[in-house]
Amino acid sequence: MGYACPVCDAEEADAVHLANHLAITASLGRDDHRAWLAEYAPDWGDCTPEELGERISPHAEEIDTPEFEAAGHDHGHGHDPGRPDSLEEGIARQSRQPGRGSMTAETQHVLEEAAELTREMQTERESDADENENA
């Protein structure tokens, strides 16, 4: 059994996935998801996914999600079914679901900036590791 998002009906595998969906979508500026969280879990930003999932799942419709019931079995993807490989893939998947508009220019800019900062941090880490090896 999984859950349907109480805002947009997106199917999620379990309470933790539902919590992540709501929090990520709200963080990306979807006011409807943010308003729902403000009503049912006002301190959602301070919760772990597990804690948030416990608080919000009673307010979401339980649904049959047979494609998720095989979680734990390897289907050649290297991850659980219904779970993205990365944050970027998760965001892209959510943007394609029903009720989603295209990404705003501001959101696209923020994601590009975050990717660039991540690349810079990785380069710095690799540089630091090289210096430590040569010292």
Image (cartoon, rainbow, N blue to C red):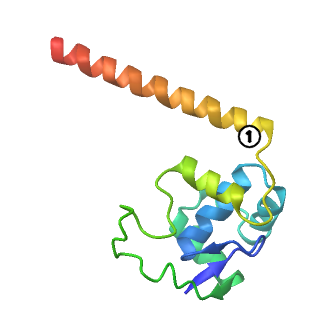
The image quarter in which residue 25 lies? bottom right
Instruction: Name the side, left or right, on which 99 lies relative to 76.
Output: right
Residue pictured at 58% horizontal, 61% vertical: 47
Residue pictured at 73% horizontal, 56% vertical: 26
Image height of 9 relative to 38, above or below: below
Three-letter amino acid code of the residue under disc 1 = Thr
Q: Which residue is mark 1?
A: 107
Image height of 120 relative to 100, above or below: above
Question: What element does badge 1 sit on?
Answer: helix
The image quarter in which residue 90 lies? bottom right
Front-lying residue, 118 or 52 = 118
Q: Residue 98: x and y, percent?
A: 76, 66
Q: Is residue 18 visible?
A: yes
Residue pictured at 70% horizontal, 74% vertical: 5
Image height of 40 relative to 115, above or below: below
Q: Residue 125: x and y, percent?
A: 35, 24
Instruction: Name the side, left or right, on which 8 lies relative to 113.
Output: right
